[in-house]
Image: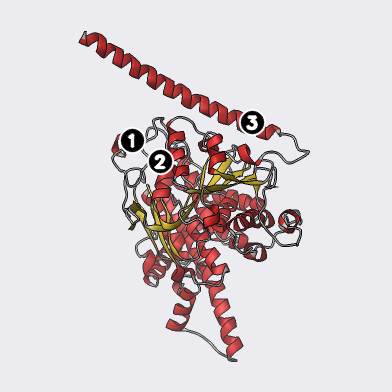
Amino acid sequence: MADFKKIEELEKRLWSAADSLRANTGLTAQEYSRPILGLIFLKYAEYRFSLAKSKIEEQTSSRRRGGSLSGDGIKSKVQAEGAMYVPDDALYSNLLALPEGSNIGINVNNAMKALEADNEAIKDALPKTYTRFENDILKSLLKNFNDIDFSLGSDIFGRIYEYFLNEFAKTEGQGGGEFFTPSALVMLITEVIEPYHGKVFDPACGSGGMFISSADFVAKHNKDASDELSVFGQEKTGDTVRLSKLNLAVHGLQGDIREGNSYYEDPFELAKGEVTGGKQHGQFDYVMANPPFNVNEIQKDRLKDDKHRFPYGMPRNDNGNYLWIQLFYSALNQKGRAGFVMANSASDARGSEQEIRQKLIEDDGVDVMVAVSSNFFYTVTLPCALWFLDKNKPAHNKDNVLFIDARHIFRQVTRAVRDYTSEQLNFIANIVRLYRGQYIDNTYLETHPDTGNDGKFKLDDFFANDSGELTYQDIAGLCKVATKAEIIEQGYSLNPGRYVGVAEGEQESDEDFTVKLTALQEQLEVLNTEAHELESCIGDNVAQLLGAS
């Protein structure tokens, strides 16, 4: 796993360097944000290009002594390795080595143009306004950004990008908003839905981190992601759409990323796939997302007639969680899987949200629920849940749901932040594989060495039967497969704590109590809202009756 502390320190140092522009130029964040991010992109493009080129040259020299590559030969091979081809005129290292007195602004503009000329996917996407900055400022930025260690994680680029966008928003008085999904959760979602081949969709795609993780999953299983995956995404702001496209391009991926509000706009006609057995299915093999939680003031009157995307109807309370959940489910084709992050309260929500959840469960759409500890998000302390939907469950899992309570599985990174070691993440994903009857896959553990691994999460210690074979079994305090009848008995709750219970000898922690109290508080707020709505409706009806008489 990437070292969170190092990444956090790096972000703050880079931001401090970038923020000097605001102090020294008088430009607004809107005016200097894209040039700053453009420099980081240029640096990352060279980093990936250098890795690909070194790998190619190593393979070439092992086949024939003295072999060399140049021109179109190296370009096509670099692109086949999942990187962008970077011509000499666009190399970040060449900008650093410019002789004294050179006009750095003109040279950076030319570097951006040269990179676009050799990579159609980013045509007209890069900034070319560097002549408005003085040489000394650009020179300082180039030196500072040269220290970025991109080896800290597969999507460290996307995280730095989103951190900067967040800080830019704050300086403009927009409040910002932490929308980067923690890499541990992205990778766990990827390991559970296993996007080996097909169409991947994220209707709240941010910088495209879900896509990068999917591509990394395919590559780690010795396939070419550009051949195996088709990527589709949607975001409501143009800047974030451009960011996602750049992130995909620098990882050697092609994607169809559209600008649009996912509540009201449906550019991919996501729910209008094949009709089988009289049932309408969606377009996509995989849906992955971290949507905004608990959004209110959505104009549901604009959505109520869209029975394709929202087949279970509109929630009556002012909350968008169950709009997202329906959207994810309806986007899946007849064999599709979805994995997404959701507010913990949605698992137990009452009223109209419970009615929608009941319909989803009756349709056997829910496959796995994972309760996640608090403090995984960098600015939100409350726990969340991972939902996994599957339209093609194996026969032995029909009308069953696997519940995993992973609130006690985490690594304490800082006082305020937690994540998973690669051993912990691999352990959770393999519980799901055992439940599904699949072979164990330790690729993630084998390809992500981690100093935090301590051997406490070995499958053999939990799931080996009397014959020494690994087989799924319910374990108190960790996991349980619940039948539809058991879920109905619990009021259609999808909260793992309701089913998994507490391990023998353990007591409920303060954190468990806080989670339950918070969920009850949220339920009370929902019930109060519905009570007010009902009171208003009764009042209107009585007034009409009295008026009629």
Residue 161 located left or right of residue 515: left
Residue type indicated by callout 1 = Lys
Residue 178 screen position, x and y as percent: 51, 43
Q: Position of residue 102 (x, y in %)?
A: 46, 67
Mark identifier at residue 323: 2
Q: Dot 1, how many residues are within 10 Å of its Cα: few (below 14), some (14-19), or many (20+)?
A: some
Number of marks: 3
Mark 3 secondary-structure assignment: helix
In the picture, measured across the screen, residue 473 lies left or right of residue 76, that is right
Q: Which residue is mark 1?
A: 300
Residue receiving disc 3: 514
In what quadrant of the picture does the N terminus appear? bottom right
**Mark 3: amino acid:** Thr
Rendered residue at 50%/33% (across/down): 349
Determine the CA span between mark 2 and mark 1: 9 Å
| SS at mark 1 in the image | helix
Q: Kindly indicate whether the residue at mark 1 contacts the one at mark 2 (C-beta within 8 angstroms).
A: yes
- Residue depicted at 60% across the width and 58% down the height: 433
Q: Amino acid at mark 2?
A: Leu
